[in-house]
Image (cartoon, coloured by chain):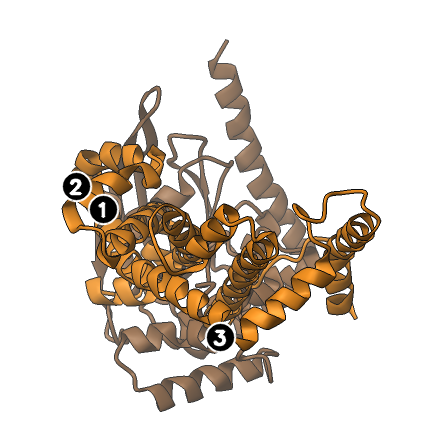
């Protein structure tokens, strides 16, 4: 029942907006060339799904996003954990990491094109970079914020270095590492689409850009809605996985 | 295990310079003795316990941990007031953690932990995580884990201080029940005078910081002991004596400033 309530609360506003949009577009309150009614968008979406076009674009974008995410998060996790363990490494790399964090990653794209050429490699490196930083920062934070009481407790029972790693460091870090991974996954999708807007002939980003240039506004909105839907689904899947892997954590449901 | 502190002085580097936590503290705890330490808050009680485990180093004086023939290992285990359980382990895994560190196999350690957990009211709740437990239940698990490891000494740092009266009474009863099995050496830090009398053989009163021993009291009640001794006349007499020892010291400490 509470679940149904949550879903209903999350849906009423977008549904209301869609209804208003439908009404306005069919009554010429807004220009249907710029804003085709949702019914027309649904028809376009159906056509693009049946032809397989939409899924092909989606597939390309997802492959780039997940490839970059995988490479970036593995490296970021390792780097963040090592940074947490070594104060010297932390002090010598933190300023650089902060600078990279503050740099819009898309602005590095021209440089990556010079380095890796115009193929997929430059795009995947860009996506990997943006996930790397997020995961590294969260992993570092997780290590630095370990409650020493648990280390003392385990040590008191005779835990050695390997035991501390396995029974304290690792489980204590996981929640925040997971937060980093979840945020990074969303960021990977966003980065993939952004970079496709600039330079690609396939993928959701390129679909958006080409639709805009040809003023195929129905296809434009379908592409945007698909990107949003996939983003939400990935986020939900990550949350589910997290709840399953960290049963001890328990989320505080906000009232 | 017999614990012996001779002329112990311990200090820390604080923000405003060196803080002396203990000064010239001497204390003997016999093997199998249950000793409570009471004193005003911030008198270095926790420091004393940590020093006894060897985590904190001393400026002067020394500590000896002398094994006795009944000891089966050299563990001196702490039981804390908070963060006493790993949040990422189930009740069963928490309780069996000490056994695991001692290399006891999975089946055996889980059997032994489950048996003790059942005895103390955890039947059917062995697989829940600490966040689902009340504070009293958490402290029960911490005490059970400690006893399962069969340590040579138990160093308890106000383990029941945050509990309500009912819960505290229950835990006193259970702690005494477990302790009666083989009379381990216990150093029990508390600020609750009644708790100290109910549980211990001897009570040591510490001064305000830097802590040193100002008085000692032998508890005249026999063993096995029922927490209901708190209703007896003698109990009140002893309590008054300890209060006076604590209070007198407070006056001298206040007078010193004039």
Indicate the chain on which mark 2 is placed. Answer: A
Circles 1 and 2: CB atoms closer than 8 Å: yes
Please state which of residues A121 and A246 is positioned toward the viewer in this rendering: A121
Q: State if disc 1 and disc 3 touch (CB < 8 Å).
A: no
| Residue at image mark 3 | A52
Q: CA distance from mark 3 to mark 2?
A: 49 Å
Per the image, label 1 sits on a secondary structure element best described as helix
Neighbours of disc 2 within 10 Å: few (<14), some (14-19), many (20+): few
At numbered mark 2, what does the secondary structure look like: helix, strand or loop?
helix
Q: Secondary structure at mark 3?
A: loop
> What is the quadrant of residue B243 in the picture?
top right
Q: Which circle marks residue A83 in the picture?
A: 1
Chain B colour? brown
Earlier in the chain: of badge 3 and badge 2, it is 3
Percent position of residue A45, x then y? 60, 67
Q: Which chain is orange?
A: A
Q: Is residue B232 left or right of residue A22?
A: left
């Amino acid at each position: 029942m509470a679940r149904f309530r949550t879903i209903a609360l999350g849906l009423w506003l977008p549904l209301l907006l869609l209804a208003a949009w439908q009404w306005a577009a069919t009554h010429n309150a807004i220009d249907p060339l710029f804003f085709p009614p949702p019914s027309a968008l649904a028809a376009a979406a159906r056509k693009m799904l049946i032809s397989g076009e939409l899924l092909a674009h989606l597939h390309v974008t997802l492959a780039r996003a997940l490839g970059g995410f995988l490479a970036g998060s593995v490296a970021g996790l390792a780097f963040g954990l090592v940074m947490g363990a070594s104060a010297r490494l932390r002090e010598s790399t933190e300023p650089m990491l902060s600078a990279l964090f503050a740099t819009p990653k898309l602005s590095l794209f021209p440089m990556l094109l010079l380095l890796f050429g115009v193929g997929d490699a430059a795009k995947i490196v860009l996506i990997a970079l943006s996930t790397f930083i997020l995961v590294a920062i969260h992993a570092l934070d997780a290590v630095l914020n370990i409650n020493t009481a648990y280390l003392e407790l385990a040590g008191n029972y005779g835990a050695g270095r390997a035991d501390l790693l396995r029974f304290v460091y690792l489980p204590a870090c996981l929640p925040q590492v997971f937060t980093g991974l979840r945020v990074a996954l969303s960021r990977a999708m966003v980065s993939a689409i952004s970079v496709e807007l600039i330079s690609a002939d396939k993928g959701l980003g390129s679909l958006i850009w080409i639709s805009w240039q040809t003023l195929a506004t129905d296809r434009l909105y379908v592409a945007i809605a698909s990107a949003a839907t996939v983003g939400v689904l990935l986020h939900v899947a990550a949350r589910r996985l997290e709840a399953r892997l960290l049963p001890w954590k328990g989320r505080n449901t906000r009232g | 295990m017999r614990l012996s502190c001779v002329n112990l002085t311990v200090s820390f580097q604080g923000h405003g310079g060196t803080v002396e936590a203990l000064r010239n503290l001497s204390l003997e705890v016999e093997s199998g003795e249950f000793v409570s330490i009471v004193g005003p808050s911030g008198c270095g009680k926790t420091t004393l316990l940590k020093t006894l485990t060897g985590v904190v180093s001393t400026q002067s004086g020394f500590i000896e941990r002398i094994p006795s023939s009944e000891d089966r290992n050299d563990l001196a285990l702490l039981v804390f007031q908070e963060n006493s359980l790993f949040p990422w382990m189930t009740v069963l895994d928490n309780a069996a953690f000490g056994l695991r560190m001692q290399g006891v196999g999975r089946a055996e350690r889980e059997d032994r932990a489950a048996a003790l957990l059942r005895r103390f009211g955890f039947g059917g709740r062995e697989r829940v995580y600490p966040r689902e437990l009340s504070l009293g239940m958490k402290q029960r698990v911490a005490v059970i884990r400690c006893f399962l490891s069969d340590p040579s000494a138990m160093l308890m740092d106000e383990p029941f201080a945050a509990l309500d009266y009912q819960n505290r009474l229950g835990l006193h009863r259970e702690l005494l029940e477990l302790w009666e099995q083989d009379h381990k050496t216990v150093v029990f830090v508390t600020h609750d005078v009644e708790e100290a009398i109910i549980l211990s053989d001897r009570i040591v009163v510490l001064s305000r910081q830097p802590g040193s021993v100002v008085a000692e009291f032998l508890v005249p009640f026999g063993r096995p002991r029922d927490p209901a001794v708190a209703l007896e006349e003698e109990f009140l007499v002893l309590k008054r004596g300890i209060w006076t020892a604590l209070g007198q010291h407070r006056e001298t400490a206040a007078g010193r400033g004039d």
